[in-house]
Image (cartoon, grey):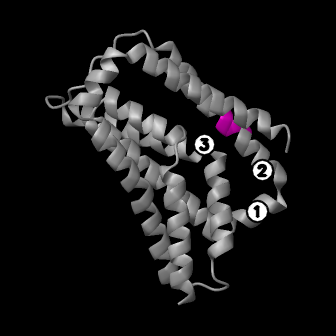
């Protein structure tokens, strides 16, 4: 019964965190409308994989590690902030460039795989670059984990975290890769890219500046 209550608490908290707007949503949304549905889904799977790594780290004592080594949190903030700012600059600089919608239906299998693997890696690195996600996972697991949990509980919680994280972004990718959102993106590409790039740069700068106050 204790494990079941802990399981529900962790899953609900992670689900609420996943659906809240942030850099992960921006990356999935932009990939879905600007590249292809397959690329959007690959990014979503990368987000899920990042969630699995955070969950595994939390089970292994991430919360205690961050408390014991405060400088580690500062490093995570700085590196994560710089990476998000880098993504934002790339998006901003490409705002005025024409972006043909990818059509990989007739592409060689190796090329499609390479493109989607790159998108999956983008999702994974974006998820892992967010130190707030690391803190959320560490805090949630520390708050809800029972004093002693079984191996079955660990497997169930890590698997469910993947379903929650990847599932939400799969929905986002499917919705935004449809024809209507794609046409709207092409029409207002410069403005949308500048807004997305500016948001990513602002988030990155906020993370770096907040690290100085730790």
Q: Residues within 10 Å of mark 2 (few under 14, many from 20)?
A: few
Q: Nearer the viewer, residue 102 or 27?
A: 27
For mark 1, what is the residue? 65
For mark 2, what is the residue? 72
Seen at 18% across and 29% down, the residue is 107
Q: Position of residue 74 (x, y in %)?
A: 78, 44
Q: Which residues are magenta?
A: 78-82
Q: Is residue 102 above or below residue 125?
A: above
Q: Chief secondary structure of the magenta span?
A: helix
Q: Is residue 8 above or below residue 73?
A: below
Q: Position of residue 73 (x, y in %)?
A: 76, 49
Residues at circles 2 and 1 in contact by the CB criterion of under 8 Å? yes
For mark 3, what is the residue? 129
Seen at 57% across and 20% down, the residue is 89
Seen at 49% across and 45% down, the residue is 124
Q: Position of residue 156 (x, y in %)?
A: 45, 75
């Amino acid at each position: 019964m204790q494990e079941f209550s802990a399981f529900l608490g962790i899953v609900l908290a992670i689900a609420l965190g996943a659906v809240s707007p942030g850099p992960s949503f921006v990356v999935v949304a932009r990939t879905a409308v600007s590249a292809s549905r397959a690329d959007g889904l690959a990014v979503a799977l990368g987000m899920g994989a990042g969630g699995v790594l955070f969950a595994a780290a939390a089970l292994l004592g991430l919360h205690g590690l961050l408390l014991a080594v405060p400088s580690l949190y500062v490093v995570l903030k700085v590196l994560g902030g710089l990476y998000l700012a880098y993504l934002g600059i790339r998006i901003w600089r490409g705002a005025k460039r024409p972006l043909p919608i990818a059509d990989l239906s007739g592409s060689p299998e190796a090329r499609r795989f390479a493109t989607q693997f790159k998108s999956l890696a983008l999702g994974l690195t974006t998820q892992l670059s967010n130190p707030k996600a690391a803190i959320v996972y560490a805090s949630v697991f520390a708050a809800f984990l029972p004093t002693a949990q079984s191996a079955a509980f660990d497997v169930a919680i890590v698997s469910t975290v993947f379903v929650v994280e990847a599932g939400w972004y799969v929905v986002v990718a499917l919705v935004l890769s449809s024809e209507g959102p794609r046409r709207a993106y092409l029409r207002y590409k410069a403005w949308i890219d500048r807004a997305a790039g500016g948001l990513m740069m602002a988030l990155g700068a906020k993370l770096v500046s907040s690290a100085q106050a730790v």
